[in-house]
Image (cartoon, rainbow, N blue to C red):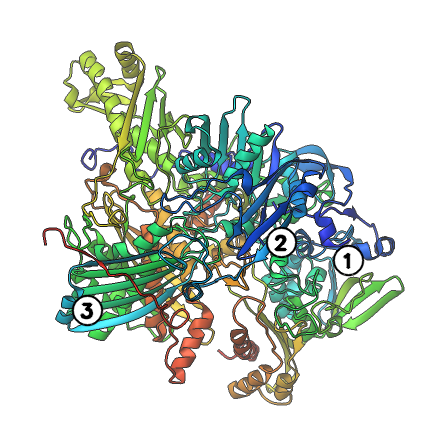
Amino acid sequence: MSSTEYAVGKREVHKELIRLRVNGETREVYIPAHKTLLEVLREDLNLTGTKHGCELGECGTCTVLVDGEPVLSCLALPIELQDRDILTVEGLAERGLAHPLQVAFAELGAAQCGYCTPGILVAAKSLLDGNPRPTRDEIKEGLAGNLCRCTGYVKILEAVELAARRMTRQ
Amino acid sequence: MGNSEGEYSVIGRPLIKVDAMAKVTGETKFADDLSLPRMLHAKILRSPHPHARILSVDTGPAESLPGVHAVLTGRALPITFGILPVSQDEEALAIERVRYVGDPVAAVAALDEETAEAACRLIRVEYEVLPAVMDLDEALRREDVRIHDYGPRGNIHKEVALTFGDVEEGFAEADYVREDAFFYEGSTHLPMEQHAALAACGADGKLCLWSATQTPHYVHRALAKVLELPASHIRVIAMPNGGAFGGKSDPFSHEIVVCKLSMLTGRPVKICLTREEVFYAHRGRHPVQMWFRTGVTRDGRITAMHFRSYLDGGAYGSYGVASLYYTGALQTVTYQVPRYKFEGVRVFTNKPPCGPKRGHGTPQPRCALEVHLDKIAEHLGLDPYEMRRRHLVPPDSVTVNQLRIGTVGLGECLDRVVERSGWKAKHGKLPFGRGIGLAGSAYISGAGLPIYWNALPHSGVQIKIDRGGGVAVFCGSTDIGQGSDSVLAYVAAEELGIEPEDIRVVTADTDLTPVDLGSYSSRVTLMTGNATIEAGRKLKALLFQVAAEKLGVPADRLRAAHRRIFDRDNPAAGMPFVEAAVLAEARFGTLGAVGSYTPPKGLGKYKGAGVGPTPTYSYSAAAVELTVDPETGFIAVDKVWLAHDVGKAINPILVIGQIEGSVYMALGEALMEEQVFRKGVHKIPSMLEYKSPTFLETPEMESILVETLDPAGPYGAKEVGQGVHLPVVPAVLNAISDAVGVRIDEVPASPEKIAKALENKRRGRAPEAPGNGRLPSVVFPEPVVVQPVGG
Amino acid sequence: MMRLPAFRYVAPKSLAEAARMMADAGPDGMFVSGGTDLYPNMKRLQFDPRILVGLRHLPELQGVSGDPRLGMRIGSATPLHQISLHPAIRARYPALAMAAGSVATPQIRRMGTIGGNLCVDTRCNYYNQSYEWRRAIGFCMKRDGDICLVAPGSPRCVAVSSSDTAPVMMALGATVILAGPDGERSLPAAALYHDDGIAYLAKRPEEILTAILLPPGNGLRSTYWKLRRRGSFDFPILGVAASLCLAGDGTCTDARIVLGAVATHPVEAREAAERLLGRRLTPELIEEAAMAAYGPAKPLDNTDLTLAYRKRMTRVFVSRALRELAGFP
């Protein structure tokens, strides 16, 4: 079938029941295989905290963590992620207590429009979980897959450093 | 306006933004995060041709696709619109003609986005392809191919020629006259959030639009016009914008389309543009060819300046007339220019329309001017800093083009970046490959005139106090990430003596909030700030009246701070804010007050004098140190020092945030970003190929705040969102020259251009001319001669 | 929102099952590993398979094993991130660690696999565009059309080989293992690639790239230099992989220089390498070799930056790579 034929919606769609563990909760969704994790989070699970900027893996906005590793939800299929731990920005705070990264981002003004923020926060969490005292260059490398157009990145770097200091002091 | 320094309890403090926690928890709802029961999804079919006549549109097959609820074509929306009253040249969906690849042609509402997209592909449009004009030269040459049937002639959208004073006399007086040409490539805003809008037409026939827009008021007007509904039946709610930078300040096709689809189907309809479509929505930086001729005395004093700009406007008017005037307006507000002539032209081309991007029309001429001055200083053997410093515009003066100057912090900005960057030890003294560059600039703190003529306030604020001490501030302003919601809370809290977290801010909702014209032209802090102060002081007077009686203290000795009203001379004597609120409500009834702000009228009466005036100008200076790899032409920016005359920092965190963001965006433009076309089509409409700098390209930045306490601003504040962008780009170009001795008179200064320039120099070849090598041939009209004020 | 076209996804438990599933799917099927290349391409309708056979979790394709003194084996589904951090690879095959660590972004290096990067679709800025964009400009021969928009006279597609790791594998003399319905075969990395933007792989559609074998890394010096606009996200628009063996007195006993992203396949700069053999590396000799590497680079105007610039940079990057390996500043 040519893409023109595809383009007019002639292909049949099979759905499957998929079990996902998101922010510690097990959720079941009945979805077609081609529905990406980004779409399922936002449209089926109402977790709209995860944003999207291109849906082609070119901006990092839709980053979530899978088993602690940063992954682009726009290019991830739920069918491949059953029994894995998925963490979105909604799962960062624990029992209503904001994660130190969230507090530092708020305090230092690292979120301006706030649109890239959810993806950057989870990417930063993954970075700090693996490297609690990163250098500034390591933070830049760790977050190099996330674009931001508001902040010029400086306040984000400072906020990650501040959060790292607070987390390692505990 | 306001108390003297040191007396503030909120203003000037590094507070967190009122919406910060919502943004870091994912709680903030952006337009595409909304969803309503029975909601349909819309898609727009766009033109595949840069220029064509629409012969027929067959929507039949699309309409019969299961899941499709409505298919819309331009015939259903025949009324044109546009942001400026003088260029109402856009159609929600093209009726007879498409003018760029991506021009909206038809739209579908369906149960899901995939069905809507599939249905769009089933719509058969028959086109007669017309010749396309893809650049300035072609647009000027091909008078036979007219993109619009208005404008003075051919594809000229607007031309302007103004002269202030006798420039020839000035050139005759000069010791040195220099001419330079420049080209500044177009670029786009690239907000991380793609434009999205949701419309719901209720059973009562009333319409509500939630949209990612910077200008809900102007969208409201455009909807009323195109949909032929009373404005009172339309409600526009601007959602928090996920970045905008000017790119969401026009009324857009997709906003009108979802409204119409909702009216047709009786169901909510949502659309979210794809990233590629955002590149087509555009309204970004105009590509501009420029030419400067400036006469100076031996010590660098300007005797006359003649400037020409040629703007490639794209397919529609948008803000273009204002953009054109802005290219010529602000040359005079930094260094003294006693005689000035400006000629400019904006042409239509078959590309997505250009409009306002951060700095609107001024980054291009500012860049050219600051490089031009650098060359003049070099020729005269003067230090570029000293030369600029010596000839600053004096405060409280009037420029030759009749702009009223307030406080001027430019000198201090230059001094501070020179001192902090170690300019004197570095300029001309760093080893080959490393360099430092300097530039100054100015920007408006809000446009003096609204987009459409009216005698109404530009900003309105309403404050209500309830008997529990809760304070709500209502204002039409739109938070696009810059923190305008927070500014409202800070100012209201300052005036009422409470804390910003005690305040609920309700903004950008045409049903609930008084009009604010929108988040453009760096107007919001100054205008909504002043309006909030007015409303706040009215309420404070009521609170003070009841408190004075209760405390037995004269009202003029009372102060409000830290949630108390107390005797300034005996702070122990006081009462909680809540108590005063209860007393005041008992005395006066429900507590509420309004404030509004209208900027002072400009001095100029000539046509075009509406662009440039502002309550006060902000000033900035930048120093950029960088390293050029002479073999590859790659630039590593080592550090940027940016000093900004912000008047008064309402919250230094937000001010520095705007500075750092502007430095970043300016570096993107200086080094890599370009909106370019090939074979009639956008060459790189993607986040991957439209190069915007990442964490790894970001240099160290030092922000320096200069406070001049301008009487026009709230507590003395000026703008910061845009002006700080301006000096960075020319400082980069000047630094490249300092580093490797070649001039790149073009933006972006990409590696290939630098490598080429260095090779030309090595081989003793002449440098390449900026842009396409020569200035377009335009016969400008006879200039309107404007006599200087009092001259 | 850009969405994927509909497909069925099957997850084999073993290599043999994967092969069977692909045989059942026939021309409607495609293998997918990390998906970071295929899914964006599918969203733009450059591919629209009905069935995807997922390889990412197959046990046979996982992990790095072996000893650099004897040679190493890398399973094709090993994430690029893991390769870039692997101690033995970093120590003995640094070019590979550098190339794997330079692909796209941290997220994509965790999702994307070495096999996927070696098989990454050739790229062209007339091709990596949405369906509507390609329709507007006119479809090209790589998908839905029959002409080349870059070189209108060209009888073949000139899309660019854009793998970072492919030139490195060639420079290291690696071998790739392909498993098909008729068993396994091994090819030198160079033989995996064809000089054709469409049929750019020698791998048959039903074959699975299962592993890469690295030869012993003793005495091997290697590096990878990548030209791109930004330090992240961007595909290479020139990649230079170089490997050398130097004798005790500094004489070059073995040399390979491979250029990526300047043709439809990674190109070996043989003449440049030959100039080095049997001679001691000096700055002058390196310049001579770098000049000779200029020839095989045949960039066209279908990536970021101009072709003239990319061609000119070939000399600069080869020179810099060799100077790094020789220990010159």
The chain carrying label 3 is: B
> What element does badge 3 sit on?
strand
Q: Nearer the viewer, residue C28 or B313?
A: B313
Q: Are marks 2 and 1 on the same chain?
A: yes
Q: In terms of sequence position, does the residue under pointer 2 or pointer 1 come before the other?
A: 1
In 3D space, how far apart are the residues under numbered discs 2 and 3 (Cα atoms)? 52 Å
Q: Nearer the viewer, residue C288 or C120?
A: C120
How far across and how far down the image is residue B37, in percent? 61, 27
In 3D space, how far apart are the residues under numbered discs 2 and 1 (Cα atoms)? 37 Å
How far across and how far down the image is residue B389, in percent? 19, 61
The chain carrying label 1 is: C
Q: On the image, numbered disc 3 is attached to which residue? A: B295
Q: Residues within 10 Å of mark 2 (few under 14, many from 20)?
A: many
Q: Hey, what amino acid is under mark 2?
A: Glu
> What element does badge 1 sit on?
helix
Q: Residue at x 20, y 42 (%)?
A: B709
Q: Are marks 1 and 3 in contact (CB under 8 Å)?
A: no
Counting the numbered discs, the total is 3
Residue furthest to the right = C182
Q: On the image, numbered disc 1 is attached to which residue? A: C61
Q: Hey, what amino acid is under mark 1?
A: Leu
How far across and how far down the image is residue A163, in percent? 47, 43
Q: On the image, numbered disc 2 is attached to which residue? A: C132
